Structure formats: C-alpha cells, structure tokens
Amino acid sequence: MRQSEIKELRNEQDFKDFYLNDSSASFCEECNDITYTHGNGFLEIAKLEDLKKEQKNIEGKQTRRKFYSIILLTEGEIHETIGHQSYHFTPGTIYFIGENQLHAVEYWSENVKGVICMFDADYFLLCIKHQIKLNQFPFFQMNQEPFIKLLEREVQMMEHLFWKLNSEKCQKTTFNDDLLTRIFLNVILLEAERIYNKKTSENAFSLSRKDQLTAEFQLLVNQHFMNKKLVADYADLLHMHPNHLNDVIKEVTGFPASHFIQKQLIQEAKSRLIQTRDTVSMIAMELNFTDDSYFGRFFKKQTGVTPLQYRKNHKH
C-alpha cells in the first residue's frame, strides 16, 4: 500500500473525523474541561457501542495513529489489522494499538460493547516521577502480541478501572485532579502488563523480516539513545548499511530512522524538565549534548518552545 493511502490520525478530533459520521459528537457529555496548552497531551474514553452507532464505513482503510489505544471488548466481535497481522477479537479480550502502528478496522459486529481509551505520549509523560516508559510495555512492542484474553474476574477488574478512570476524568476541575486521572491510566497499564506477563505464550510471535528489524532497531534506540544519536550507530549494531536501515524503517513505520532517535531524546528531555528540578544545563549534559545552546535549539525545533518555556507551561 502506498504511503499516501494511509491516513495519519494525530489526536481525538482526527479520530472522530475519520471514524464517525458526527465528528462533533462528545465522547462524554458530563466531562468538565481543562484547557491545555499545545503539547500537553490528551486522554479520551468512549464506549464501543456509542462509537458503533456513529461508525462510518471504514472497513479496511488503513491509518497510523500518533497516539496509543487500549480497547476492552466485553460483547460482540471485532476484526482488526494491527501492523501486518489480522486479529479476530471475542468478548473478554483487551487489545492495544501502539503509536505509529499500522491499523485498520475490518469489522465490528452490531452488538459490540466495551470501552476504548486513547491517549498520547505527552499525556502519559506527565503522570509520576520515574515511571515506566510506554515503549517498555510488552503489548506496545512490535515483536509482541498486542492482546490479552482475560478471565471473567479480570474483565470485571478492568471494567472497574476504566470506570474509575473516566469518573476521575469527568470530575476533574484542577491539575491535581488531572494528575489523579493520569495515575489511574498508569494503574490500568501496569495491571494489564501483570496479566500479560502471566499469560504470554512461549511461542515466538511471527513477524516479517522487515517488521523484526524495525522492532530490533526500536529496542536498540530505547537502550542507547542517550549515547548513540546517529542512524549509522544503529546500522553498525545491526550489521547493515545506514541507507538500508533507514529505508526499511520508513517503509514499516512511515518515518525515517532518525525520527525515533530524536523522539526518544525529546521524551526523555520532557520527562526530566517536568519530573525533576535539574537545570537545563544539567539535562543537556546528562543527555550528552555538546552544549546548552545546541540542546536548546534541538528542543525548540522538535517542540516549538524552549526547554524553559516547556517546563513553565507544564508545571502543576
């Protein structure tokens, strides 16, 4: 499929425009609103049955989401393609769609029920100090299966956690309230990871060679981004030419290899600006930038604001 045929969805409004007949519909009429500055992230929760009522005929149309999705299916059937794998989900399944993952809805049955939670990396980033990074959750990794089959009591627990998450989101009036919402999101992911790790099959997850290479590259970036900032560094680790590595990564993800190195650096910088009291100079040094001004230019080019402006905009 040509890249131009893959629709990029950046946020919740893009999601509504692409999937729903009424793109102005609210996911939750009862919610209070906190207006965020650009870059502060978003969290949206909706019932699958409500989405089904407004769903366009989008079967088979491919997207690439710039955010993360968690879907708990309690009734009905869903067929979706995640990456290059097709899945048939039945009641009692929770499944996950990672950022930049190729995705297509193939079929939702008329009686579908459950919940979908969508959020971006910036929203999760603001949760708590020293938190686990999103790309460390196994179900968001390309070389791991993106779903879990739950026991009845696990479904009930997850339903309650999603209800609590939505309740906190609806009642929030201050940034401290919103911090509690973020913590419940963290709890859902940690509980899902605990269940996932207990149930993970010992059988290797089948991937194409290009998908496997992309997964290996992303894992290496997660491990070495602070010291290795060039695509050539990772090509050496993978024993291939940088151009070939870049071509494969772009074909699979839609982005050049350098995008993932830069993104990891920016996420780490944002985390330290928000979650620590380290000076900009200290952060630049810890991330192995040659000087403060270079770090500042890099950060502003990627985010549109200086490190100090970002810290000021996101302080609770």
Image: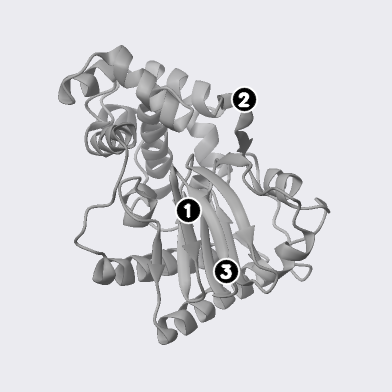
Which amino acid, mark 2?
Ser
User: Where does the N terminus fall, quadrant-wise?
Assistant: top right
Q: Is residue 292 visible?
A: no
Q: Residue at x 71, y 51 (%)?
A: 35
Mark 2 lies on a secondary structure that is: helix
- Name the mark nearer the viewer: 2 or 1: 2
Q: Quadrant of residue 247?
A: top left
Q: CA distance from mark 2 to mark 1?
A: 29 Å
Q: Position of residue 154 (x, y in %)?
A: 41, 81
Mark 3 or mark 1: whose residue is earlier in sequence? 3
Mark 3 lies on a secondary structure that is: loop
Answer above or below: position of 76 versus 257: below
Q: Residue at x 35, y 50 (%)?
A: 133
Q: Which residue is mark 3?
A: 77
In this orientation, which residue lies closer to the viewer: 41 or 60? 60
Which amino acid, mark 1?
Phe
Q: Residue 124 has which mark?
A: 1
Q: Residue at x 40, y 56 (%)?
A: 146
Q: Is residue 193 visible?
A: yes
Q: Quadrant of residue 117?
A: bottom right
Mark 2 or mark 3: whose residue is earlier in sequence? 2
Q: Is residue 241 left or right of residue 71?
A: left
Marks 3 and 1: CB-CB under 8 Å?
no
Q: Residue at x 37, y 26 (%)?
A: 249
Q: Position of residue 141 (x, y in %)?
A: 34, 48
